[in-house]
Image (cartoon, grey):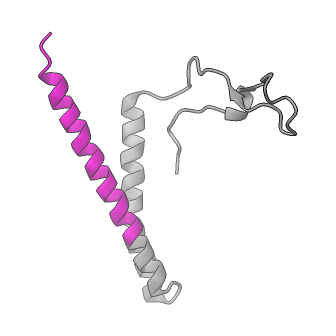
Amino acid sequence: MTNLGPKINLFERIEPSKLSMNTPAGSMRMKSIEQPESADFKTVLSGLVENLNNQANAPDQVLNDAVMGNADVHEVMSAIQKSDIQVTIATTVVGKVIQTYEKISQIAI
């Protein structure tokens, strides 16, 4: 599974603060993010769709394992529920994106 989100190392962005220098870990103030290293929208979206497809197909593999005796019913039901939740979230996000696009397209320029 490939993570296509921004590649930001948060620990490199922690800078000292005058308020919390006495703590064992030092300060937890974050530096601002000037330019995150991220892929273009098409790459991120295609990666998310591919990940969703893999997650949607995961219950099939677990079911096959259960038929072969390598997994129990609990694992199958858990995989099905995880897949169902992810598909529901993806459907909701797509709906919100379409609603936002429609609102933006109605804005008079």
Assign the magenta stretch its main secondary structure.
helix
Residue shown at 58%/17% (left/top)? 34
Q: Nearer the viewer, residue 33 or 37?
A: 33
The answer to whether 94 appears left or right of 68 in the picture is left
The answer to whether 68 is drawn above or below residue 84 in the figure is below
Q: Position of residue 49 (x, y in %)?
A: 36, 47
The answer to whether 45 appears left or right of 9 in the picture is left
Count the marks: how many?
A: 0
Q: Position of residue 107 (x, y in %)?
A: 14, 18
Q: Nearer the viewer, residue 88 or 71?
A: 88
Q: Quadrant of residue 12?
A: top right
Q: Nearer the viewer, residue 6 or 93?
A: 93
Instruction: Locate the C terminus and report the quarter of the image it occupies.
Output: top left
The answer to whether 47 is drawn above or below residue 37 in the figure is below
**Is residue 92 a member of the stretch shown in magenta?**
yes
Q: Quadrant of residue 67?
A: bottom left
The answer to whether 107 is drawn above or below residue 12 in the figure is above
The answer to whether 74 appears left or right of 14 in the picture is left
Q: Residue furthest bottom?
A: 69
Q: Which residues are magenta?
A: 81-109
Residue shown at 80%/22% (left/top)? 18
Q: Position of residue 74 (x, y in %)?
A: 46, 83
